[in-house]
Image (spheres, rainbow, N blue to C red):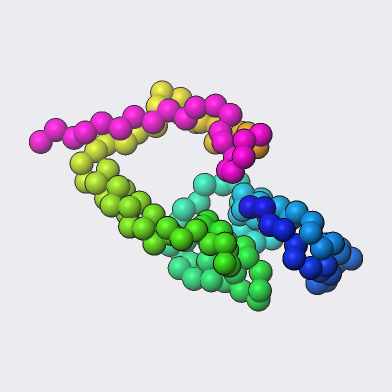
């Protein structure tokens, strides 16, 4: 996420000054992998959100943004609500009607990321997943 500084700003609790008209880059990927916010950030732990339902609110407290899957502030993605509805519908259909399994490799590398593309980091290699419709 790129932003343009509209005024010179001294970053609180640091010796950093951002001059007026500077381009500032915020990386949700790096923020979402900060060990001081998320213990064991490189481990796939979706249960952390079930075990602590208020986790997103906690990491976004005290004026800091520790969780921003759809951006933040006035630049927040306007389709966030619709994206959530679509995602829930797709996951529901997949879980109800399909079997999903990892491909032939037992362990797949999901931390080797390519940051050369604009936007989000991409996996450097493919992840093999098999999605097969259940038969009645």
Residue 47 seen anywhere in this rendered image of the structure: yes
Residue in the picture at 46% in, 53% down? 46
State the residue in front, 89 or 59: 89
Snapshot quadrant of residue 20 = bottom right
Determine whether 62 is above or below 49 in the image: below
Residue in the picture at 57% in, 67% down? 74
Q: Is residue 80 left or right of residue 38?
A: left
Q: Residue 51: x, y in percent?
A: 46, 64
Residue 33 seen anywhere in this rendered image of the structure: no
State the residue in front, 51 or 133: 133
Extreme residue toward the right, this view: 15
Magenta stretch: includes residue 61: no
The quarter of the image holding the C terminus is: top left
Q: Is residue 91 left or right of residue 133?
A: right
Q: Is residue 36 left or right of residue 13?
A: left
Determine whether 8 is above or below 43 in the image: below
Residue in the picture at 14% in, 33% down? 135
Q: How many marks?
A: 0
Extreme residue toward the left, this view: 136
Magenta stretch: includes residue 131: yes
What segment is highlighted magenta in the picture? 116-136
Residue in the picture at 49% in, 71% down? 54
State the residue in front, 134 or 45: 134
Extreme residue toward the bottom, this view: 62
Q: Residue 134: x, y in percent?
A: 18, 35
Snapshot quadrant of residue 39 = bottom right
Determine whether 131 is above or below 82 in the image: above
């Amino acid at each position: 996420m790129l932003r343009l500084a509209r005024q010179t700003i001294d970053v609180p609790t640091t010796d950093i000054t951002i001059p007026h008209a500077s381009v500032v880059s915020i990386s949700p990927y790096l923020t979402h992998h900060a060990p001081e916010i998320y213990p064991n950030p490189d481990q796939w732990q979706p249960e952390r959100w079930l075990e602590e339902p208020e986790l997103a609110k906690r990491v976004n407290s005290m004026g800091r943004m520790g969780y921003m899957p759809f951006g933040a502030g006035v630049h927040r993605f306007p389709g966030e609500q619709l994206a959530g509805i679509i995602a829930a519908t797709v996951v529901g259909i997949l879980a109800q009607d399909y079997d999903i399994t990892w491909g032939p490799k037992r362990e797949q590398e999901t931390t080797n990321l390519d940051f050369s593309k604009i936007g989000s980091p991409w996996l450097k290699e493919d992840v093999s997943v098999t999605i097969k419709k259940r038969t009645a």
